[in-house]
Structures are given as C-alpha cells and as structure tokens.
Image (tube, grey):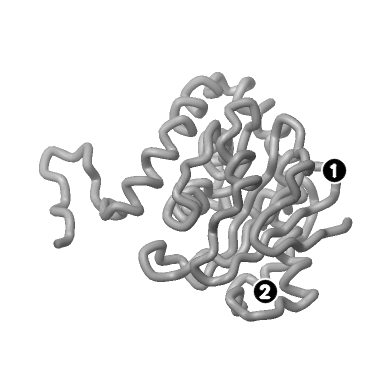
Amino acid sequence: MTHTLYTGDIPAELSFGRCVAIDTESMGLNVGRDRLCLIQMSSGDGNAHLVKFKRDEYDAPNLKKLLLDPSVIKLFHFARSDLAMIYKYLGIMPTPVYCTKIASVFVRTFSDRHGLKDLCRDLLGIDLSKEQQTSDWGAAELTKEQLSYAASDVLHLHKLKEILDERLVREGRADLARKVMDFLPVRAELDVVGWANADIFAHKPTRRPD
C-alpha cells in the first residue's frame, strides 16, 4: 500500500478509472460547524491519494471535475455524511453514488453492524484500526499514523462493493438499493440546509429549526 498527499487539489492527469472510492476527514461530525480537512481516494489498486485543505481554500478544480464526472461512480461508506461535507465546502454534489453502508443494510439483515470496520472484518477478514478516527485532522502537519488511517478507509471499498453487489442480486434487492443510493445526494443536501433530523415524509414533519 502507498499513499500520496496533495495540498488543495489533485493533479490534472490523475485518473481513477470508472469507480473511485472516496472518504473524508473533518474536525467533527457537525456539517454546519466542523470544517472539511481531508479527502482521500483510491481506484482500488492498493494506492490512496489524499488531498489536504487549508481553511477556506476549497477551489480544487481538478478534484471537482472528477467528482462531477457522470461516467465515474463515487464509492463511499456512509455516503450521506461525506456528500454533505463535500456539498458544504466544495459547493458541488458528486454523482453517481454508491454506498457500501446502504448495500450492507439491504443484504445483511441478520446484523445491526454495518460500520466499515464490521464489513471489512466480516466480508474480507481484515481488521481495520480506528485508533486515529478522532484525531486532530485540522493540524498543520498530519502524522504518518493519520495518513495511513485515512488511506485504509478507501483501500477496501471496491472489494466490498463487489461482494455486496453479488448479494444484492442474490436477494433481489439491487434495484431498490440503487434507487435509495440515487436519493442520497438529496438526503445530504437536506442535511446541509437544515432538515438533518426531520422526517419530511411523516404526516406532521418535525419543524425546521429557525
């Protein structure tokens, strides 16, 4: 495994093929408060490419071009959170989207454990370390441990997708899962603009906070 760190954007010539695994790191989980610090990507070849952002510097034209390319699948685990961060700070909404967490919920109904660590252990026999998950991603210099952790979160998504896709077909839920994943960008946008916890489909939806 190798990982390459860039500041502010990826090189124009960098290609990830037809499916790019993506994850983000931020100062916290509140999209309205906690800034985006890092985006990591992989083509599934065992290598990761990481983009570190300075505060309020999110131009990144090459990265945005990739994220908006309709011919490239953007592969996430728990896409809802990552899409919200990208939409908030880069000002774009990546599509099309695939989420391994959503796929797992549809086919692993025997379990309530759908975290990335759980999937890697149960489906791939890989024990991911989450020791750096809550570290300071806004630091001026990231440690080797932080970079290795960030890279590990995208290196296995392609293999997980392959296994989960087979099970979605086997269980007859591939079409439904696809429809839910197609809705994820809308769900993420609702999170950003203030309907994160409201059930808008309920007869009496929760009032939007002022």
Could you say which is closer to the camera, residue 46 or residue 39? Answer: 39
Q: Position of residue 84 (x, y in %)?
A: 44, 52
Q: CA distance from mark 2 to mark 1?
A: 23 Å
Tags 2 and 1 touching, CB below 8 Å: no
Left or right: residue 6 compared with residue 170: right
Residue 136, percent from left and from top: 60, 79
Q: Secondary structure at mark 2?
A: loop
Circle 2 packing at 10 Å, graded few (<14), some (14-19), many (20+), is some
Quarter occupied by residue 3: bottom right
In the rendered view, does 144 fall on the left or right side of 201?
Answer: right
Q: Amino acid at mark 1?
A: Asp
User: Which residue was labeled with disc 2?
Assistant: 132
Q: Is residue 111 above or below residue 106?
A: below
Above or below, comparing residue 165 to residue 50 in the picture: above
The vertical placement of 63 against 55, above or below, is above
Q: Earlier in the sequence, mark 2 or mark 1?
A: 1
Question: Which residue lies at the image location 60% right of the left edge and 53% below the top edge?
Answer: 60
Residue 78 at what x, y percent from top left? 53, 49
**The quarter of the displayed image where residue 133 is located:** bottom right
Q: What is the number of the mark on residue 45? A: 1
- The mark lying in front, picked from 2 and 1, is 1
Q: Quadrant of the N terminus?
A: bottom right
